[in-house]
Image (cartoon, rainbow, N blue to C red):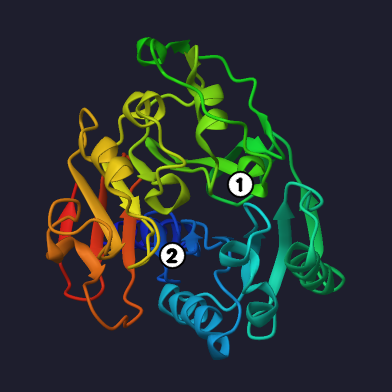
Amino acid sequence: MIRSRTVKRLILALLLALPVWAAKTLDIYFVDVEGGQATLLVSPAGESLLVDTGWPGFDGRDAERIVAAAKKAGIKKIDYVLTTHYHTDHVGGIKQLADRMPIGTLVDHGPNQEKGANPDKLWAMYQEVLAKTKRLVVKPGDKIPVKGLQVEVLTADGNITSRKGDPNPLCQGAERRAEDPTENARSLGTLITFGKFKFLDLGDLTWNKELDLVCPVNRIGKVDVYLTTHHGMDASGPAALVHAISPKVAIMNNGEKKGGAPPAWKIIKSTPGLQDLWQTHHSAAGGTESNVDEAMIANPKGTDAGHYLMLQAESNGKFTVTNSRNGNKKSY
């Protein structure tokens, strides 16, 4: 009897000694910043990565929504804040967030390459936060050291990864467009892997750079979840990329009057193997034909209430998406 109890106590002690995060999920919050981006990832090890900080102004609306998501996730600090590029809807909320919550490290592609009154203002604001924070400048092929995840940089400052890939037959007939000189084409895009689960976020990367990623070979491979590039605008998202990565689920971080363009929406919806598209907003441009069922839209037509979409992924590749507005949940 004594030996049996001793063994049981030993087993219990070993179980208690295991990392508390061992069975946890990767949690992703697609925060509603009304047509900008603020995507909060919390790894199974408890470290956090925030991709972009939404808009400035609005009495700190976007920063407050990010803080609220962090609170739901049980974190009091953002370990890494990644700025995909220096446009107002992606970096504008950085100062307001820094005033409300500790930030560990800022991650970016290097200096802002755009010039003018607004770009200069945004860069000065970013520099103000940077003066008090660590910085990590990355290039394609680099890894961002978020504990519990593999965060690989695919694109940065107009350059793309040298990853190898298989020939992509969808490139045949794919037309290129006029070169984009803006920060969009310099977006810092990442492939985030947790076990068998893969999540792709290319920021606002535009058409030609996306084609460079998958033509003539697909350097990304297939993914489970795709955050639609550029909020579902038709300046991005060629079928040669979207159909090649063949996501099970796409998340569109559009606003009511930004993104969700019918041509881009239709490319996504026609993706082979796609099970569902979820939207952060009803798209006014989409009308009745190019919007998903309202149950899968966080913020339906009308007054915005800041509802978010939340994804929980397991290392075996299984994941669940939940609409915070109505509790609608679906597992994949």
Kindly indicate the quadrant of the structure image that contains residue 303.
bottom left
Vertical placement of residue 8 versus 299, above or below: above
Residue 282 place in picture, x, y as percent:
25, 65
Determine the residue positioned at 76% across, 52% down. 114
In the rendered image, the residue lying farthest to the right is 131
Q: Amino acid at mark 1?
A: Asn
Q: Is residue 14 left or right of residue 121?
A: left
Other-residue count near label 2 (Cα within 10 Å), few / some / many at <14 / 14–19 / ≥20: many
| Label 1 – label 2 distance at C-alpha | 15 Å
Q: Quick one: 169 or 329, which is closer to the camera?
A: 169
- Closer to the chain start, of discs 1 and 2, is 2
Query: What secondary structure is marked by label 2?
Result: loop
Question: Which element carries disc 1, helix, strand or loop?
Answer: helix
What residue does disc 1 label? Answer: 184
**Residue 35, numbered circle:** 2
Q: Quadrant of the N terminus?
A: bottom left
